[in-house]
Image (tube, rainbow, N blue to C red):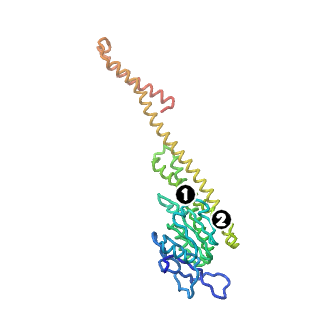
C-alpha cells in the first residue's frame, strides 16, 4: 500500500563525503503537491530524482491521517501510535514517554492566533530510530513555514533530530512573534483606556475595548499553555542520552528562549489584568457621573416642585390666589429655588 503522507529524506551524500552538505537530492514519496492542504493528508517536500535504493525517511509528517495510514506506520516501525483521544490527555506520563526505544512527545501548539478564536492543538512527535514522525490534526503556521524552509534548503532535514529541533525552534519563534504582537496591541489599548476624556477626539467604545482585552488575555493564556508543554518536552529530552552534543546545545538554546518568552507572557497576562481593572473602573466612573447628574437634577427641581405643589392645593383661604402679582411671584420663587442649589453645587465642585 502506498502511503499518502509527507516523507522527507536527508540530502544525498557521495560515498567520499564525510560531512552532510546541502543538496537538491532530497526525495519525497507520495506526490508533488508543494504544501499539504487543510483537512487532508497531502504530499509535500523537495521534488527530485527518485532514489535508486530504498532510503529511510528522516521525517514523516502525518496531517489528518486515515486509519489505514496509521496502521501502515505502526506496522512499518513496530510502534503503537497514540489515538486522537490519547493525545488530548494532560497527564505527563501520557504525553512524554519512552516505549522500546521510541520517544513519544505530545505538546499543545497555538493555532489560529490571528483569528478571533485562537486554539491549541495537540501534536505528537515520535522519534523512532532515525525517523521523526509528526502526528497532527491541524496545520499551524510553524509547520507550514518549516516545510517551505525544508523545500528551499533540504540540509535542514539532515537527520530526525535536526527536523525535531527545527520544528521546535519554529514553534518557539512563532510564539515569540505572537507575544510581541500582543504586547503592541495592549500598548495601543493602554492609550485608549487612559486617554484624556476632555479631548474632542476621545471616543471610547468600552465593549470593543473589553473584547480586545479579553482576546489578548485568551491568547496569552493559550500561549502560556503551549510554552509549558514545550518546557516539559525540553526537560524530557534533556534526560535522553541518545542526543548528540550539538543537539543538546540547540536544546539549551530553545529552553532559554522558552523561559524568556514565558516571562514575557506573564508580563502580558499581568497587563491584561491591569487594563481590565482599569477599563471596568472607567466604566464605573462614567456610570457614577451619570448618576450624579440625575441626583443634582432631582435636588435642583425639588424646591420648585414643592412651591408648585403648595399653590396647587386650591384651599379657599390662600391670599396669594387673589393677589395680582401672586403668579409672577410663584414663578420667580420656583426659578430662584432651582438656581440656588445649582450655584451651590457648582461652588462645591460637584458639577
Please name whichever residue, 318 or 108, is drawn nearer the observer in this view of the structure. 108
Taking the view exactly as shown, the residue that stands out farthest to the top is 317
**Local crowd at mark 2 within 10 Å, few (<14), some, or many (≥20)?**
some
Helix, strand or loop at disc 2? helix
Residue 304's place in the image compared with 114, above or below, is above
| 77 over 138 or under it: above or below | below
Towards the viewer: 168 or 132: 132
The x, y position of residue 257, in whole percent, is 64, 63
Residue carrying label 1: 222
Q: Is 230 above or below relative to 155?
A: above
Viewer-proximal residue among 12 and 42: 42
Residue 193, percent across and down? 51, 47
Q: Quadrant of residue 236?
A: bottom right
List the residue tagged with mark 2.
Answer: 236
Q: Quadrant of residue 51?
A: bottom right
Question: Which label was assigned to residue 336?
Answer: none
Residue 19 in which image quadrant: bottom right
Picture coordinates of residue 104 (x, y %)? 60, 68
Amino acid at each position: 500500500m502506498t502511503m499518502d503522507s509527507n516523507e522527507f529524506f536527508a540530502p544525498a551524500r557521495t560515498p567520499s563525503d564525510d560531512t552532510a552538505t546541502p543538496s537538491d537530492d532530497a526525495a519525497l514519496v507520495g506526490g508533488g503537491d508543494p504544501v499539504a492542504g487543510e483537512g487532508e493528508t497531502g504530499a509535500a517536500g523537495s521534488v527530485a530524482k527518485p532514489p535508486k535504493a530504498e532510503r529511510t525517511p528522516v521525517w514523516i509528517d502525518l496531517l489528518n491521517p486515515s486509519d489505514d495510514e496509521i496502521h501502515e506506520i505502526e506496522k512499518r516501525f513496530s510502534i503503537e501510535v497514540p489515538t486522537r483521544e490519547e493525545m488530548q490527555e494532560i497527564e505527563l506520563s501520557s504525553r512524554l514517554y519512552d516505549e522500546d526505544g521510541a520517544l513519544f512527545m505530545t505538546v499543545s501548539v497555538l493555532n489560529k492566533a490571528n483569528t478571533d478564536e485562537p486554539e491549541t492543538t495537540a501534536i505528537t512527535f515520535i522519534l523512532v530510530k532515525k525517523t521523526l514522525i509528526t502526528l497532527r490534526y491541524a496545520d499551524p503556521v510553524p509547520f507550514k513555514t518549516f516545510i517551505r524552509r525544508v523545500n528551499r534548503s533540504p540540509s535542514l532535514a539532515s537527520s530526525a533530530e535536526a527536523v525535531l529541533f527545527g520544528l521546535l525552534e519554529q514553534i518557539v519563534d512563532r510564539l515569540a512573534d505572537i507575544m510581541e504582537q500582543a504586547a503592541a496591541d495592549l500598548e495601543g489599548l493602554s492609550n485608549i483606556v487612559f486617554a484624556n476624556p476632555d479631548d474632542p477626539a476621545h471616543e471610547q467604545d468600552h465593549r470593543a475595548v473589553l473584547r480586545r482585552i479579553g482576546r489578548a488575555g485568551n491568547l496569552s493564556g493559550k500561549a502560556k499553555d503551549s510554552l509549558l508543554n514545550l518546557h516539559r518536552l525540553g526537560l524530557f529530552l534533556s534526560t535522553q542520552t541518545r542526543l548528540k552534543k550539538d543537539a543538546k546545545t540547540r536544546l539549551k538554546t530553545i529552553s532559554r528562549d522558552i523561559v524568556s518568552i514565558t516571562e514575557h507572557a506573564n508580563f502580558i497576562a499581568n497587563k491584561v489584568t491591569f487594563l481590565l481593572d482599569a477599563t471596568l473602573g472607567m466604566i464605573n466612573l462614567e456610570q457614577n457621573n451619570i448618576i450624579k447628574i440625575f441626583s443634582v437634577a432631582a435636588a435642583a427641581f425639588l424646591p420648585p416642585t414643592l412651591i408648585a405643589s403648595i399653590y396647587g392645593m386650591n384651599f379657599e383661604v390662600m391670599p396669594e390666589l387673589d393677589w395680582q402679582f401672586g403668579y409672577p411671584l410663584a414663578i420667580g420663587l420656583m426659578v430662584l429655588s432651582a438656581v440656588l442649589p445649582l450655584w451651590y453645587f457648582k461652588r462645591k465642585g460637584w458639577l
